Image: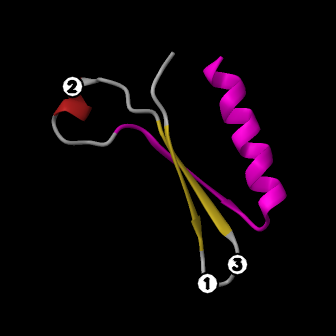
Amino acid sequence: MKDVTITIVKSEKGDYRVIVNDDTGTDENVGGSKGNDSSFPYGDKASVKKKLDEIFETLE
């Protein structure tokens, strides 16, 4: 199982951004990178929940 860090940010406008970081142990990460970040913008909580469900499925 790989390590994944998920950050959810809510903007002042009320929309959301989900940042997924797959904390892999590559040479680049050892040099100070925080891994491979992916950012997903969403307008509502239901969309965020759907994305989190997709992420959890990939971890199994």
Residue at left offset 70%, top offset 78%? 14
Q: Position of residue 54 (x, y in %)?
A: 74, 34
User: Please, what is the three-letter code of the amino acid marked with disc 2?
Assistant: Asp
User: Please, what is the three-letter code of the amino acid marked with disc 3?
Assistant: Gly
Region of the chain picked out in magenta, as a range: 35-60
Q: Residues within 10 Å of mark 1 (few under 14, many from 20)?
A: few
Q: Residue 39 magenta-drawn?
A: yes
The answer for how far apart the CA atoms under marks 1 and 2 are is 37 Å
Res 27 label: 2
Q: Residues within 10 Å of mark 2 (few under 14, many from 20)?
A: few
The image shows residue 22, relative to residue 60, as above or below, that is below
Q: Nearer the viewer, mark 1 or mark 2?
A: 1
The image shows residue 5, relative to residue 42, as above or below, that is above
Check disc 2 and report its element: helix, strand or loop: helix
Q: Position of residue 25 (x, y in %)?
A: 30, 23
Residue at left offset 61%, top offset 84%? 12
User: Please, what is the three-letter code of the amino acid marked with disc 1?
Assistant: Glu
Q: Is residue 18 left or right of 36 when viewed as pictured?
A: right
Foreground of the two, 31 or 16: 16
Res 12 label: 1
Q: Position of residue 22 (x, y in %)?
A: 45, 33
Numbered disc total:
3
Do the residues bearing badges 1 and 3 touch, measured as CB atoms within 8 Å?
yes
Q: Quadrant of residue 13?
A: bottom right
Q: Position of residue 45 (x, y in %)?
A: 78, 61
The answer for how far apart the CA atoms under marks 2 and 3 are is 37 Å
Q: Which badge, 1 or 2, is on the more N-terminal residue?
A: 1
Q: Quadrant of residue 41?
A: bottom right
Q: Which residue is mark 3?
A: 14
